[in-house]
Image (cartoon, grey):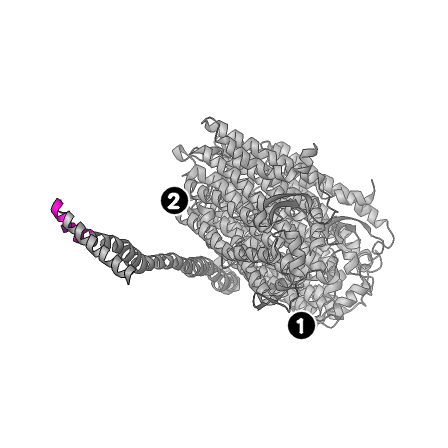
Amino acid sequence: MTTEILIWLIPLPPVLAFFLIVLFTNRSKALSHTIGVGAAFLSWLGAMIVFVRALGVEHLAENPFTSAINWLPTGDTFLKIGVLIDPLSATVLFFVAWTVLMIFLYSVGYHNFGQPAGDHDHAGLPPHGATVHGHTVPSVEPMYSRFFAFIGLFAFGMFTLVVSDNVLTMFVGWEIMGLCSYLLIGFWYGKESARNAAIKAFMTTRVGDVFMLLGIAFLYSVTGSLSFKDIFSEEVLHALASVPTGVFGLSAAGLIGLLLFIGTVGKSAQFPLHVWLPDAMEGPTPVSAMIHAATMVSAGVYAVIRMFPIISLDEKTMTVVAFIGAFTALFAATIAVAQNDIKRVLAYSTISQLGFMIAALGIGAYVAATFHLVTHAFFKALLFLGSGSVIHGMEHGVLHTGNHKVDPQDMFNMGGLRNKMPITFWTFLIGGFALSGFPLVTAGFWSKDEILADAWAHGHMIVFATLAIAAFMTAFYTMRQITLTFLGEARTDEAEHAHETPWTMTAPLVVLSIFAVGYGWVGIPEHFPGLGGILPNWFHEFIGSMLLEHEAELEFNLIPLATSLIVALGGLAAGYLAYRNVKSPAEDKLQIPVLKNKWYVDELYNFLLIKPAIWFSEVFVSKWMDKGFIDGILHLFGPATGGVGSVIRNYFDLPVINQFFGDGSAEVTWWFGRNLRPIQTGRIQQYLILSLIVLFVVGGLLYFLLMA
Amino acid sequence: MDFLNTHLLSLILFTPAIAALVMLFLPNEDRLHRWFAFGVSLIPFALTLVLWNNFDPNATGFQFEEKYTWYEAIHSSFHVGVDGISLTMVLLTTLLTPLAILASFSVSDRVKPYMMLFLFLETGMLGVFLALDLLIFFVFWEIGLVPMYFLISQWGSANRNYASLKFMIYTMGGSLGLLLAVQMLGVLFGTFDLVTLYQQWNSLDAGSMLMGMPVSTVKSIAFWAFAIAFAVKVPIWPFHTWLPDAHTEAPTAGSMLLAGVLLKLGAYGFIRLVLPLYPVEAKIFAGALALLAVGAIVFGAFGSFGQTDFKRLVAYSSVNHMGFVVLGIAAAGLASGTADAHIAMSGAVLQMFNHGLSAAGMFFLVGVIYERTHTRNLNDFGGLFPLVPIYGGILIFTSMASLGLPGLNGFVSEFMIVRGSYQPLTVYTAIAMLGLLFTGAYILKGIKNVLHGPMNEHWAHGEHKLTEINLREILVIAPLMALMLVTGIWPMWILDIINKAVTALF
């Protein structure tokens, strides 16, 4: 099979799985997950073959695998859609395929496949456990098959986005993921919080999406094409940079870049559209891992990386990008330190890390951002899946004690889990250290260090300082999380009775932790003391070849390296020291209301945007404008017509027609009749006399008239 | 075979009406009437497929033309024909009518007149799409109103008298100017033939005098006379308030056709008459038209979001979606001759088709739930998903098509309209995005309030027990869903024809 055809086929298995499960196999859990995981495996296989073949191509950036067909007739031309594998998409495809496959596998265990159906479980609510021989054991998810259908559709969206050779199908994949994100966050739709979170996620990202759509329309209008090959050609880029738009003094490239970037702000949960992601933790944990760590939120960053040639043309847009990214990185980190829900910490951490990537792009650190995107996808997926494993273990404890008041996600209810769940502990530790940027051995160190080095080398001191502080806080809250969850002694009976999860859940953790460590080695800077040059800096070569102007390898500088060492190790140490003896939230000094309440952004939006929008819809438009004003005017026509009618009737029809002409003529006739009645006496003599009189009168008149 | 080819359009047009008359003589048996009407309504659909098959997308001008003497005294002839635009609409009409009739199998009140009215309605609608003579156009335009009026006023729900009267009077009132303008054209040129009028009317010297006024003034007035008639029908803001009432009160199948086809008559009027007859005025007044269209998009979306009645919510969504059609038309009028115009206009025609599918589908699904629960109040629902999972899945699918989710049909047309309107009408397009955003809000509100939530105990047991969507109902919605998906993935099957017609015309 040619590589091009194979690329076309990569997204298809999961979407076929979606239709198969929805239409035919949804009653059989085993069949459904076989189809689901099998489809993910096929896509993975295709992706790996394509990846290996892509590695074998010299100068892949100039000679990518590509194939396109006519899709939309537009006047005399066609809008083409197609697939493209260049170094960037090959790299992204690699991590997407791995994480997707792992998450599919993990879902089997997470949703308790093989366990009995619950005693009181309903579709739409998380399973509550089943009683077997007097013991309460975990029960299987009632909508097990549906879950695999949804994540299949989601995987289709992500693969479509990655292999697209044009902005339009990229947007299609983007939106399909948005739908799946909505469906999966609201998977347990019986919960009020899940329902609201689903809508919030969809609507918040849609704010970004409509701007993005506008940007795509603009781009398409100006360039007449949407395929990357055409729009990133030198002439087009030059034209885009030189056309002014009159909006904020931006060039066409700047405005297009900004509009597309707003789409990313929504999808990658950057400030000010970050609010949906923490709430999205209402979804099942594999969903959090897949959508909110490894793939969908990465898609936002991927879009900016993809559009980098256009975005980087305008300084103003780049400044906005850098500012948003750096601010978000710090802002989200401050919230993360005060969260007690194990998944919410990771959610804010994700926002923060995405901020790192966006900031890196804003300062032009293309390769570093891509590198961090990949390593982050691995270690954050690992962390989310690890947290799901922890929650699962805790739920086990809750079922054991029967005390359902204990929140299995609250870290203050945990402690000492390292002995109960060793695999989860060690893999979580690896993920956490990678997130913190633990020096040399973790992938997170190499990618984060590269961002800081780039910021330093290009003189972006504010970005450098902001990111350094954020990195310190990252290490701090990560160690806080590890300490509270795994170290020390169990703080509740439930934690005491937690135990390790099945192999379907731990195996993905192990695989991902290998990447969380090993992936860093493909991007060790050439000039790094001691280690540089032992392994070639493959990543830099491969991704760097995407740019028209190849980025030079940075000269080594001690200051950024020292900074990243200090913030990582210092943060970890501080986190451990501060929390090793903390027993309850009351002893936690960082439970500051403003941080705990996420800087009150939700409350602000509710007050400024949501309430007014509801009022505008329900009262202004529906009641005042439509029912009151417009219908009010229409209803005037009724009475007005009636009024005209009654005027005509009362002042013309009745008096003139009826009374004057109608009744009047009758009246006249009647008057004559009445007044002539006396002469109708019935006496012959009178009639003869009258006849005689008439004869004389008529005769006299005739005589007079004729003779005279 | 030859007769079929030369009289194809007449056959499509009159089969339903003749069948309706035949129904008069059928024995009084409800089952018979239902199946007869359904079977007969499949004939125009089958003929349309023949038409589609034999249609040559590359030929310019009208095809399958038929012309008969009709009203010689005022030089009006019975002239019909199709091009790529009307063909699409004919397909939509002949597809939706059988489905609407199938959806009405649960109606048991006065089945015979009900079914007859549907068949008459089909002829009325088809006539508008096929007419190439202004007077014929107007006649069918008005004929379509009558069956719909009776369908609403006789088979509608509680507030049906108000709604049907408002619908009838408003549409007729709007058409008065159209009638006058049509008469004027007929008197001026001694013909109502559209093909001739396109030429002669446009070749009038703009500076010369006509009936004591400069030609440009006459044309401006006539433009608005046409535009208002069609604006009421589409409807665009602020002429839209008849729509929520009429849609909400109409019986389910009535709403399907009302939203699915009748609204398209207005948009079709813009495309077939306004733009070709008034290219100059369409340019001058494009901004005003776009403003009203954007009003429809934005206020339609907000209005929909503000409803607590499920059917009204869907009804307002039509205002929102049809606003995009008019935005595309305005852009095409402004930028005629450019690629922008072609894309915007193709998008508008496709949006008409797409909205026909999704609106009919949505109204049908509202009807399915209303028939079982006898309420449309969104606050009475919630938590129905566990009770009716198949219905829920279908509702989400159709809602997503309506929302314009990429991969389904609505996205393609909305994208084309936005793309085509961006350059000529940048600001309006940007504001329209606000409507697009709130499209999401009302669709999700509908899904949330109907399906989501803990299992609804009220509808779960006993006499209120909600039953799953049945096979007949699935058969009604399945073709629509299939078309939504196919058009979303491979729009070429229909866009090729639309695009060629549009490129030749505008």
In the rendered structure, which segment of residues is drawn in magenta? A673-687
| Amino acid type of the residue that numbered disc 2 sits on in the rendered structure | Ala
Instruction: Give me the disc on residue A246.
Output: 1
Q: Residue furthest right?
A: A58
The Cα–Cα distance between marks 1 and 2, rounded to whole angstroms, is: 54 Å
Q: In what element is the residue under mark 1?
A: loop
Q: Residues within 10 Å of mark 1 (few under 14, many from 20)?
A: few
Q: Residue at x 78, y 51 (%)?
A: A84
In the image: residue A137, left or right of residue B84: left
Chain for mark 1? Answer: A
The reply, left or right, for residue A272 in relation to residue A121 is right
Indicate the position of residue A124 as horizontal and vertical percent values.
Answer: 51, 41
The image's mark for residue B33 is none
* Quadrant in which the N terminus of chain A is drawn: top right
Q: Which residue is mark 2?
A: B158
Residue at image position (64%, 47%) is: B86
Q: Residue at x 46, y 29 (%)?
A: B30
**Apparent side of residue B259 relative to residue A679 in the rendered image (left or right):** right
The chain holding disc 2 is B
Q: Closest to the observer: B357 or A654?
A: A654
Q: Quadrant of the C terminus of chain A?
A: bottom left
B382 lies left or right of A504 = left
Could one spot residue A418 in this view of the protein?
no
Quadrant of the image occupied by residue B324: bottom right
The foreground one among A127 and A428 is A127
Q: Secondary structure at mark 2?
A: loop
Q: Is residue A507 magenta?
A: no
Q: Tell me: residue B360, above or below residue B294.
A: above
